[in-house]
Image (cartoon, grey):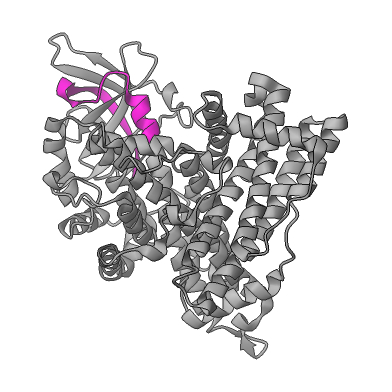
Amino acid sequence: MENKKEIKGGAFMVQPADPQDIFIPDEFDEEQKMIAQTCQDFLDTEVFPVLDRIDNQEEGLIDSLLTKAGEMGLLGISLPEEYEGFDQSFVTAMLSSEVMGSAYSYAVAYSCHTGIGSLPIAYYGNEKQKEKYLPKLATGEWKGAYCLTEPGAGSDANAGKTQAVLSEDGKYYILNGQKMWITNSGFADVFTVFAKIDNDRVLSAFIVERSFPGIVFNPEEKKMGIKGSSTRQIFFNDVKVPVENLLAKRGQGYRIALNILHMGRLKLGGSVIGAAKRSIMHAVNYATERKQFGMLISNFGSIKHKLAQQVILTYATESTVYRASGNVDELTEIYMADREKGQATVTAFAQLAIEAAAMKVFGSESLDYVVDETLQIYGGMGYSAEMPAERAYRDSRINRIFEGTNEINRILIVDTILKRAQRKEIPLYVKAEDVYQSLSNLTATQLPESYFERKQAQIEDLKKVGLTILWALVKKFERKWVYEQEILNNISDIIMQIYVTESVLLRVWKLEKTMNQEALGIRKDILNTLLFDSTSLIQIAARNAVNSFAEGDEYRLLMNGINQWTQTDAVNCKEARRRIADQLIEDKRYAF
């Protein structure tokens, strides 16, 4: 234990990582693969044949499917064994989320139940609460939901007005208020409800059962996508909640909500991988069947470009999600030295808040690209509800809103990393100031000749871009930088691209000794193309940021630094993408 190096969230910006220190999805063991196959078999036999019935919200269908999943043990993967769960690692839970993520509306119901519907009780409940609720949630006898959002409290969750007042006899909290956009609300038996006790400034959390008198449910919302997911408004009218159903302590609800959101953002990253892989499978199969101008459209360069880019973004998301998930497991093990596993796990989520937000944004936007181009590959047929591209396109859009909007998450990335720098949790300010000072005496980076060390050196240069602009931002605006959201968005995109590209580098580097050269060559094509594109995106974001606040000598120095540190090797991206696409066409599915 003492030999383990504790991971600090955001530290990737100030130090290079070692490929041997990260988990990659190519390392799943046989038990994990078996769990994934069980999830896939369940979808193939129970869910995919009834997708239209799910979208039509057939009464009781999703509820019954969750019950079947519970009977197979698929709802308790993350829950402790003493409560009918399997107590698996976070990586394993993420793998199951990935597979289930391909199941459209059902994926939302499953993710809600196994994540925000169950884990607040698992992580924050006392023994009596766990004993009462977790076994039923693990087996699917009861379904879970999570009530945070209100009409006037979305991104600003602590602005909620739902109130709890202690009854005169001290036995109940009397709950009054309204919640909206509540997933699984049509059938859930147990709700984690956030409310303020008396005139508290911060939220508390309560376990509320559907059977408690005074709960009123609005009709199902009519939505653009995820039509089969149950979504309703809920009204609490003098609902008597036993005092023993207060979750954790009074005033800890906001902390619970934040930490569960960190977890949800990471798990959303896993879900979109599954959705992307299924969409890619549809795209490549259609492209290898559809003929135009006397030949299969998969032979056209424009189609190969789309297919390859779908693979690149999915591989990048996959590499980064499992890197972060492996870190969760490592940190949990470290933190268990002085706390029980549930609290150790949520502490790990909080530590990785930056990485979780990055995964949420990058993953959801990558999936949007994938489903959009799948529909485009289908052409006019893609717009037909008869084809799978249409459902995937509609269902994808919510992911940029789920678990905090992408706008909020972009701000959170920069806000969190700067606060950690101020608290000296990571040496970001020291490194950033050093890099900024070097602008007046720039020297070209001497890139190594060896392939992986060279790519690593290029990524370290990209980190200098982000660090320099972070330091210039703080120096220019001091504490008022929080009002410069456009610049924060630019910096966030830089940080996100660095983390993702480095994760792909580390994965491919780790595969060097175990993968045959032909397969490794395709992975290098993915890395080369991603790094080339990321460098361009970082340069644009950096220029936009600098143009927003710098002038005179500082402007010239910053621009010189950006130009110096965004130099990259020439890459024939056209041929690289063609090789990636050809491999996809040969496999007829994502198999990277």
Q: Tell me where residue 173 sits by quadrant.
A: top left
On whether residue 246 falls in the magenta region, the answer is: yes
Q: Residue 482, image x and y in percent?
A: 62, 25
On whether residue 258 falls in the magenta region, the answer is: yes
Work out whether residue 375 can be spotted. Answer: no
Is residue 455 shown left or right of residue 138? right
For the point 65% across and 53% down, the residue is 457
Q: Nearer the viewer, residue 265 or 198?
A: 265
Relative to 408, say whether 51 is above or below.
Answer: below
Is residue 540 shown left or right of residue 101? right
Q: Nearer the viewer, residue 106 or 131?
A: 131
For the point 53% across and 46% down, the residue is 361
Relative to 102, say whether 76 is above or below.
Answer: above
Q: Nearer the viewer, residue 326 or 315?
A: 326
Q: Residue 432, image x and y in percent?
A: 65, 34
Work out whether residue 393 can be spotted. Answer: yes
For the point 54% across and 26% down, the residue is 419
Relative to 384, say whether 328 is above or below.
Answer: above
Residue range highlighted in magenta: 231-260
Q: Nearer the viewer, residue 298 or 592?
A: 592
Is residue 221 shown left or right of residue 217? right
Q: Which residue is the extreme one toward the bottom?
A: 294
